[in-house]
Amino acid sequence: MKVALVHDWLTGMRGGERVLEQMIKLYPGAEIHTLLHIPGTVSEAIEACPVHTTFIQRLPYAATKYRWYLPVFPWAVEQLSLSGYDLVISSSHCVAKSVITDSTTPHLCYCHTPMRYAWDQFDAYFSRERYGTIRYATIRAIIASLRRWDRATASRVDAFAANSAWVAGRICRYYGRSATVIPPPVDTDFFVPEENVKPEDYYLVVSALSPYKCNEVVFEAFNRMQRRLVVIGTGPDKERLEALAGPTVEMLGRVDGKELRSLYQGCRGVVLAAVEDAGIVPVEVMACGRPPLVLARGGASETIRDGVTGTLIQEQTPEAIIEAIDRSEATPFNSEKIRASALQYAPDRFLGRFSTFINTSLENLH
């Protein structure tokens, strides 16, 4: 079977790229089609595949400023040549789900999320205060056009899978389509507890530093408590958050996998105040035997049992975060039970669920 895997862009190893790695395991001879590829930024398994890109690859500053070209992404993805394949699988959080395929070629989509900035989180990404009246009006017009195109092209997908029930709900709301829920894989063989290590007195934020992540609320909570917070990640909100960080907030930027694992193993918990699409970070810290604290909305809340494997934060406020930390520290968590809960997200579990989705979808199409 000749299979094409379509991914939005290959510029680093995040949750979507981990899913793509698993798809390659199912179809080792697959070819990858993407808007652009920065060699050396993704895993050896992905780099070993034939990769086909679009004209975005050749545009100025594409390697670092590719998001500037968002208005032409729809045109670019529709130029991908997908003739002659027996199956097309898209891994989409932006435009990959909208590729044009042969009429007889099944197209299955693993949707990480409909575009947040085009739908329910526009205000978190773009504000009049940040961009000014003229630029803001221009952005609104571009996003409105992108939203119409995104909805109209959902019919190009024969069957959707979603990484959480939360995202499945958004697919239903914005595309009018149902989706099979398949949680993303987490490397539970790598993220493991460290024996005889007691938690130190710090909490973690592991997050892209983007406005929609609401990290400023977490910073304010820890500034008030004068408790130690270690922040892992980078992004467009970095400078603003640095200005908000008090003396107990330490921003480390990017770290490698081993350092991240060590920080998970030694922390009191990971704090996530955003409405997450899925819950990879909470599962990673649970695989290390530590309890996450996550907002009681979104995909991350689906990964924990409140008071058993983690703690739910009831609102996106400093007060709610402080209250959740107090409850977490008063809870006698069992690290083995937390670890056992994470194992349901192991890669082999993902592969089993995704294989079933593919086989069932193809049977239904025939």
Image: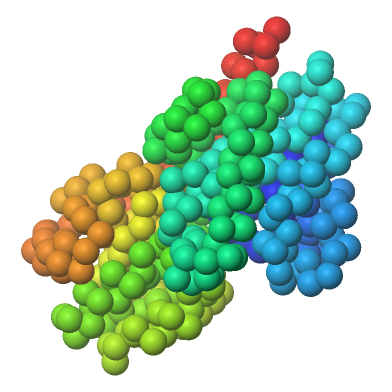
Q: Position of residue 74 (x, y in %)?
A: 74, 44
Image quarter where the N terminus lies is top right
Near-viewer residue (221 or 343): 221
| Left or right, 36 with reference to 17 | right
Residue 159: quarter of image: top right
Residue 365: quarter of image: top right
In the rendered view, tell whether residue 101 sits above or below residue 42.
Answer: above
Residue 244: quarter of image: bottom left
Q: Position of residue 196 (x, y in %)?
A: 28, 72
Please tell me which residue is depicted at 79% across the width and 59% down the height of the picture: 37
Image quarter where the C terminus lies is top right
| Left or right, 59 with reference to 161 | right
In the rendered view, tell whether residue 291 sits above or below residue 350.
Answer: below
Please tell me which residue is depicted at 67% across the width and 30% down the height of the picture: 153
Please tell me which residue is depicted at 25% across the width and 48% down the height of the picture: 296
Q: Position of residue 157 (x, y in %)?
A: 66, 26
Q: Position of residue 259 (x, y in %)?
A: 48, 76
Near-viewer residue (169 or 304): 169
Please tell me which residue is depicted at 64% across the width and 51% down the height of the picture: 142
| Left or right, 224 with reference to 126 | left
| Left or right, 112 with reference to 63 | left
